[in-house]
Image (spheres, rainbow, N blue to C red):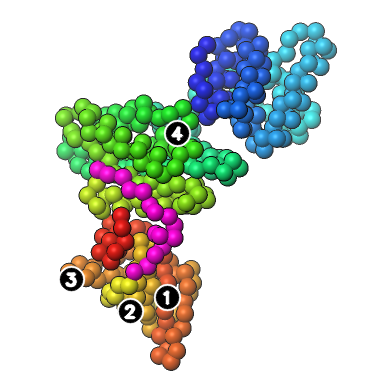
Amino acid sequence: MELNSDKYNISANLIKILIESASAEKDFTLLLESLRGSAEFSDDLHATLLSSLCGLEFPEAEAKQYVDDVLDNKARMEVRLERPVSFHVALLDHLMKNGQRIACPKITDLKTFEERTKLIMVDELTGLYNRRYVDSILSREIDRAKRFNLQLSVLFTDLDNFKQVNDNHGHHTGDEVLKQYSAILEESLRTHDVAARYGGEEFIVVLPETADTGAKIYGDRLLEKCRHHAFPMGLNISFSGGIACYPNHGSTATSIIEQADIGLYYSKAKGKNQITILENNKRNAVRYPTVLDVRYITNQSHLEGKTKNVSISGLSFMGSAPIQVGETIQLHLQLPATDKVFEVGAQIVWVRKIQPKMDYFLGAKFTNLKPEIINLVDKTGLPA
């Protein structure tokens, strides 16, 4: 049997052996021993195995000891019963007698379990993993990168002008575009990369042990494949992307995805069909002197002030009344040399009182980034 060596499919491979082979227990045991001896698969083999077979989460060291205990229990049961005992029967017996973790287990066919698990993890339309799965995997990969001092990159992509595809050619064509783009993503992956449909026309690729420059090379190749692919109706399909890297841009799955999303917005604002690597968190937080008229709306009132500086992550401004730290407000910014005013949500992060004028100096971070902000900051000197 040919097995996928992707470590995210280790548990699926083990389950597949149990399902497909009448003498599966021998295959299972041999595979377990071979994987234990492989540095490529040993990081969280036992934790993944127990999570897949019984839905329990163990730290890897504890999981390995638990699996060893189950194997010992299996040997004892075979002596007592004078017949072969499968690993999962020994596991259930051990859990019930010693584990005290499952009080009332439900037994289900492994094939049914695998199908249900696939529904939870996989996007039905594209066959890629879904948001729930990639969020979980990204957190695990970050933990692994921390342990072994590795880098990790995330490429966040969004198909350009996809709404026009649906509006002009129908949702059936739109679905076909999504499926073909997903196939391009999947065929471009290395063994341990993970691609997922994050929602709508947004996709994420997790690139373990990859610096942002390596992720950019991967992304540019992906752009080139899209340019030469024959999409339905002769459509020219492109995407915009943003890249963020652990540890440069954050230390959690949420922060890295947020930073990659900012890079994506940069690419959209700069003309689409391109990929942006963010410099780093400190660079993204650099504020540039920019004086704009601003109206800010709180729960109590509408107030006016002037900005002092702005970055892609937030701004500071002078106001005549204090606002509580943590309060969410709506900012109405008057763009320079135009009549355009745009709104953006923000959260107050600090407040300072200015003497003797009794004015207030306030700092706010944007809660929803817009291309207008990127364009505004670019005009003051922040490089894309």
Q: Amino acid at mark 4?
A: Val
Q: Earlier in the sequence, mark 3 or mark 4?
A: 4
Q: Residues within 10 Å of mark 4 (few under 14, many from 20)?
A: many
Q: SS class of the residue under badge 1?
A: strand
Left/right of residue 273 with respect to residue 62 in the rendered view: left
Residue 195 point in image, percent of width and height: 41, 34
Q: Amino acid at mark 3?
A: Ala
Considering only vertical position in the picture, is 248 above or below 299? above
Return the residue at label 2.
305
Q: Residues within 10 Å of mark 2 (few under 14, many from 20)?
A: some
Return the residue at label 3.
337
- Is residue 24 in view? yes
Q: CA distance from mark 1 to mark 2?
A: 10 Å
Q: CA distance from mark 2 to mark 4?
A: 46 Å
Q: SS class of the residue under badge 2?
A: strand
Considering only vertical position in the picture, is 45 above or below 80? below
Of tags 2 and 4, the one toward the viewer is: 4
Q: Residue at x 36, y 29 (%)?
A: 188
Q: Amino acid at mark 2?
A: Gly
Tag 1 and tag 2, C-beta contact below 8 Å: yes
Residues shaded magenta: 273-288
Residue 194 is marked as 4
Residue 253 is marked as none
Tag 3 and tag 2, C-beta contact below 8 Å: no
**Extreme right residue here?**
80
Q: Earlier in the sequence, mark 1 or mark 2?
A: 2
Tag 3 and tag 4, C-beta contact below 8 Å: no
